[in-house]
Image (cartoon, grey):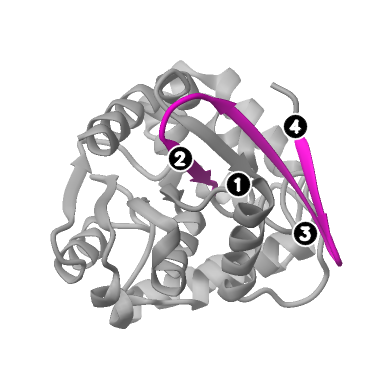
């Protein structure tokens, strides 16, 4: 499927449209790109009209210099929706993408049909804030691949790493293509933004999901999001850690199809 490019002042966004059916947008995490959904798309492409895109500073979108805010990512999404003439859609956001999805649901509720918050964050406690700030310092250090190597145990189960070294190597190769300053700018948004006190305003029918052993986007935070978003559903995926899209794409795909098609 060929990529397209949406050009606006100061930002060119790479995006990809594929499939047919209800409109569904997939928003990737920090340090990643639209390719992070490659393993999940086969589960979705025959059922949904998919849009996935590279966030500003990541993938093949413009490496915008300077500080990023959550509102920048939300505004970029809204502009892309206008560009492709989609009035609304289902949204699935993973990690930073899930934080952006929260921001979209709060700022542009009319754009959101159903919402899925995957392995994302809200309501960090003091210890969790300390740990994510330490990870931010690693990213801000700018050593290529350092954050990926230090995060392997948080992101993947030992069984997956042993069974799929080629997939780990490919994910590391992609990570190494990041611009260090843009990576850090995006990671700061993930590390320092918290919408926990606003979640009660989300009106979209929502699914919150994370891996049972995800440390950074843990089950306590998932339960908090579930409690604060009225009528939401919660799905904890047994034994998994943060990188659900790479390690368990079939499980994620089946979960999404079930929720979004209901």
Q: Earlier in the sequence, mark 2 or mark 3?
A: 2
**Left-right relation of 157 to 49:** left
Calculate the distance from the C-alpha at mark 4 to the C-alpha at mark 3. Answer: 24 Å
- The dominant secondary structure in magenta is strand
Magenta part of the chain: 4-28
Depth check: give the residue in front, 12 or 262.
262
Residue at position x 16%, y 51% in the image: 233
Residue under circle 3? 180
Task: State whether residue 7 appears in this view.
Answer: yes
94 within the magenta span: no
Q: Splitting the image into 4 quarters, where does residue 7 fall?
A: bottom right
3D distance between C-alphas at marks 2 and 4: 17 Å
**Mark found first going from the N terminus, 4 or 1:** 4
- Position of 39 compared to 220: left or right? right
Mark 3 and mark 1 lie on one chain; the one further toward the N terminus is 1
Q: Of discs 2 and 3, which sits in the foreground?
A: 2
Above-or-below relation of 35 to 242? above
Q: Which mark, residue 148?
A: 1
Q: Is residue 19 magenta?
A: yes
Q: Is residue 15 left or right of residue 235?
A: right
Q: Earlier in the sequence, mark 4 or mark 3?
A: 4
Q: Residues within 10 Å of mark 1 (few under 14, many from 20)?
A: some
The picture places residue 244, in percent across and down from the top left corner, at 39, 37
The disc placed on residue 24 is: 2
Query: Which of the two discs, 4 and 3, sits closer to the camera?
Result: 4
């Amino acid at each position: 499927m060929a990529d397209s490019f949406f050009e606006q002042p100061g930002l060119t966004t790479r995006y990809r449209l594929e499939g047919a059916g209800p409109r569904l947008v997939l928003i990737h995490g920090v340090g990643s790109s639209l390719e992070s959904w490659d393993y999940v798309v086969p589960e979705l492409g025959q059922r949904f009209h998919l849009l996935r895109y590279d966030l500003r500073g990541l993938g093949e979108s413009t490496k915008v210099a300077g500080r990023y805010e959550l509102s920048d990512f939300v505004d970029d999404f809204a502009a892309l929706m206008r560009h492709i003439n989609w009035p609304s859609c289902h949204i699935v956001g993973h990690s930073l993408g899930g934080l952006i999805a929260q921001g979209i649901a709060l700022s542009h509720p009319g754009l959101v049909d159903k919402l899925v918050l995957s392995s994302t964050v809200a309501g960090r406690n003091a210890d969790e804030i300390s740990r994510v700030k330490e990870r931010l310092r690693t990213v801000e250090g700018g050593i290529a691949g350092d954050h990926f190597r230090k995060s392997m145990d948080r992101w993947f189960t030992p069984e997956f790493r042993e069974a799929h070294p080629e997939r780990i190597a490919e994910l590391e190769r992609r990570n190494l293509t990041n611009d260090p300053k843009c990576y850090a700018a995006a990671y700061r948004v993930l590390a320092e933004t918290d919408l926990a006190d606003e979640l009660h305003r989300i009106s979209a029918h929502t699914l919150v999901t994370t891996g049972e052993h995800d440390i950074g986007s843990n089950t306590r935070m998932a339960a908090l999001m579930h409690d604060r978003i009225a009528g939401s559903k919660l799905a904890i995926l047994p034994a998994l850690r943060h990188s659900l899209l790479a390690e368990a794409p079939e499980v994620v795909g089946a979960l999404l199809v079930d929720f979004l098609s209901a």
